[in-house]
Amino acid sequence: KDNNYYIKNNKCESCPTNKICDGINAYDESYCTNPPTGYYCDGNNIKRCSDKYSMYCATCNSSKCLSCVVGYYLSNNTCNYCGDGCDYCVNSSQCSVCSKGILMDSNNKCTIFCSSVISNCELCPNATKCTECLGGYYVNSNNKCSPCTDIANCALCTDGSTCTMCKAGYYLNYSNKCAECNILNCLSCDRDGTCLSCNQGFHQSDDKKSCLQNQTNFDCSDSNFMRIGNLCITRKNMGDSSMLPIPSSVNIATAGSDYCYSNSQRCCWKGKTSDYCDLSNGGYSGCTRTVCNWEAAKEICSKFNYAGKTWRLATLLESENWVMNSKGSGVNGLMLCDYASGYQSDRCPSMPYCNGAYNSQCAPWAVWGVEETDSTAYTRNTSAGRNFRGGCTKNCACSVRCVTEIE
């Protein structure tokens, strides 16, 4: 319902000039016979109650306000505020009906939130019984709220065994379970696992079993990419742009949390990568970039299919001149994090720690390479202008850049 529209032939049409609309009907401003709610007749003209009496006046006639909107009471032809959390009241000190999810205290004030007396409760008639829970919870047999996570990957549920909506990246199958939507770049899946909608820049295939890149003449000139010879490189970290996604097969944490405990897990950390970062300037900052362990880096690049290309991590030889091409080259260079000097790239502090990475090592100025030897994955270290093959254990958190060959 929108007062800028009215219903015509079962469609919502824009309110015509010289008409007053209430979301359902269109009324002639200059011919007043039956004004809609919130309006009154002034001769042959329809006028708003809120313009004459108060912006909180709901109904009126030509001489006075008759009622107020929810949360206000009428006194001396004026609508006054009931008070925080109160929908209907006698006066500002005596509430009769509290807002949804709030209980009245002994002083007729609406101060007790359902969620404060019953965890995760949205609506409760008293302090011991919940009738509606917050999203992601359901009312159990004890009139309390239990999480929908009792049903794997469920976001909304009606009880402990019935899911109505799954988490992003999952869909409700015919067994009423949340199955993973394994279609890359798919936003949502149908019950049979076909894709209903794709990420921006992609479209459904005819059989709806894949998301195809929109046809473009890809020449690596987009601002998210950089070309060196026949190699196209993602300028920003994977995950730092909507065009550089991280697949659902990779776990994403927030820097500072710690739920990836093994270097065999695919983990990325998004957020502040050091306690020494100054985030006051905003923008694209190396201090708030996405960093990942090596297993995640391999997975991300192997699943990235932008422009229909096959992407991967770079070899160490391929990345030899990345530092040269990133420093002093302005917007044409890679968005590398160098804490020693600017060189047209964002700076990072010298402390390479990332609270939450498996071994607390976070090196956003180092870029993962494809080679590995035993437990070590080699990186290209870009710190302070140096360019060398630095060894970092596979559970460090480093920058992820993907490459592909182009003509």
Image (cartoon, rainbow, N blue to C red):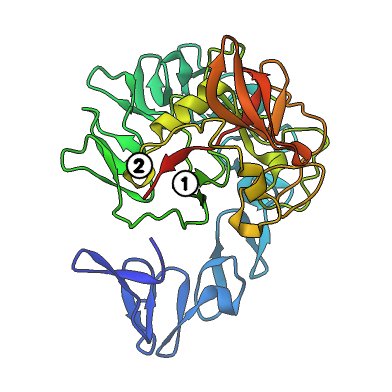
Q: Nearer the viewer, mark 2 or mark 1?
A: 1
Quick one: label 2 or label 1, which is nearer the N terminus? Answer: 1
Q: Nearer the viewer, residue 74 or 127?
A: 127
Q: Amino acid at mark 2?
A: Lys
**Residue 45 shows up from this direction:** yes
Which residue is disc 1 drawn over? 232
Q: Nearer the viewer, residue 380 or 34?
A: 380
Asked if residue 83 lies left or right of residue 291, the reply is: right
Q: Position of residue 316 (x, y in %)?
A: 57, 30
Is 29 located above or below residue 371 in the figure?
Answer: below
Question: Quadrant of the rendered structure where residue 356 is?
Answer: top right
Is 243 located above or below residue 46 in the figure?
Answer: above
Tell me if label 2 and label 1 are in contact, CB under 8 Å: yes
Q: Nearer the viewer, residue 97 or 246?
A: 246
Q: Secondary structure at mark 2?
A: loop
Quote the CA–CA distance across marks 2 and 1. 10 Å
Local crowd at mark 2 within 10 Å, few (<14), some, or many (≥20)?
A: some
Which residue is rendered at x = 36% and y = 66% of the image?
23
Q: Secondary structure at mark 1?
A: strand
**Residue 109 shows up from this direction:** no
Q: Nearer the viewer, residue 400 or 197?
A: 400
Local crowd at mark 1 within 10 Å, few (<14), some, or many (≥20)?
A: many
Is 272 located above or below residue 371 in the figure?
Answer: below
Q: Position of residue 243 (x, y in %)?
A: 46, 47
Which residue is rendered at x = 59% and y = 23% of the image?
293
Which residue is disc 2 drawn over? 309
Q: Position of residue 118 (x, y in %)?
A: 61, 21
